[in-house]
Image (cartoon, rainbow, N blue to C red):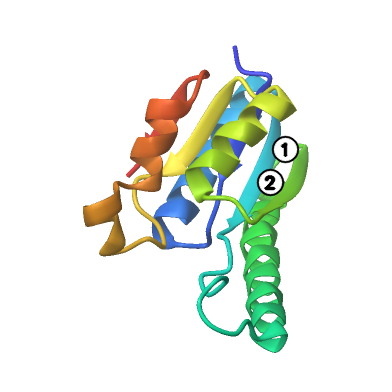
């Protein structure tokens, strides 16, 4: 039924559960899996003087965190047979929900899998969770893993 599953991952516990679910679904359907990590826009641009070292440190830390999250998904894909074909992607300077929805469209995914709550924490109470925004904006089915 599914040929290409997009997993939104941020390395959180909910994301880990979503990853296990996405890998199991991909394996059961013989689908390709794309794991996407979205780097939020640098939060301090436009506020006083911009420190290029602060931006570089932010991006380096985000890319390291993305690599760790992708490595965990890759381990799940290769743990049992048959292995699940995996592509990893990184989207930068975009809000997480928009990055996931846009990538689903550009990659031709027919299912999006996200965790019910991730790195947004208390802010999601005011802004709405990434998962809720993906559900509202996506043109393909979205599976929200708790």
Closest to the observer: 79 or 54? 54
Q: Secondary structure at mark 2?
A: helix
In which quarter of the view is residue 27 placed?
top right
Residue 66, position in %: x, y? 65, 63
Task: Name the quarter where the N terminus is drawn.
Answer: top right
| Mark 2 and mark 1 residues within 8 Å of each other at the beta carbon | yes
- The residue drawn where x is 74% and y is 48% is 88
Residue with the mark numbered 1? 84
As measured in the structure, the alpha-carbon distance from the residue carrying label 2 to the one carrying label 1 is 5 Å
Residue 143, position in %: x, y? 43, 30
Closest to the observer: 33 or 131? 131
Residue 31 higher or lower than 117, as above or below: above
Closest to the observer: 4 or 24? 4
- The residue drawn where x is 63% and y is 56% is 93
- Label ID, residue 77: 2
Q: Give left or right: position of 85 versus 17.
A: right
- The residue drawn where x is 55% and y is 71% is 46
Task: Name the quarter where the C terminus is drawn.
Answer: top left
Q: Give left or right: position of 137 versus 64.
A: left
Q: Is residue 43 visible?
A: yes
Residue 7 higher or lower than 74, as above or below: above
In which quarter of the view is residue 55 placed?
bottom right
Q: Earlier in the sequence, mark 2 or mark 1?
A: 2
Among all residues in the image, which is located at the extreme top? Answer: 1
């Amino acid at each position: 039924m599914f040929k290409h599953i997009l997993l939104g991952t941020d390395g959180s516990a909910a994301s880990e559960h979503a990853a296990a679910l996405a890998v199991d679904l991909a394996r059961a359907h013989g689908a390709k899996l794309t794991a996407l990590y979205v780097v939020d826009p640098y939060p301090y641009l436009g506020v006083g003087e911009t420190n290029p070292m602060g931006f570089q440190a932010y991006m380096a830390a985000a890319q390291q965190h993305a690599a760790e999250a992708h490595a965990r998904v890759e381990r799940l894909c290769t743990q049992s047979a048959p292995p699940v074909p995996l592509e990893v992607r990184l989207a930068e300077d975009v809000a997480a929900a928009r990055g996931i929805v846009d990538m689903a469209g550009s990659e031709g995914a027919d299912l999006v899998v996200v965790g019910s709550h991730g790195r947004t924490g208390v802010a999601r109470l005011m802004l709405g969770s990434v998962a809720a925004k993906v559900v509202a904006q996506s043109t393909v089915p979205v599976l929200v893993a708790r």
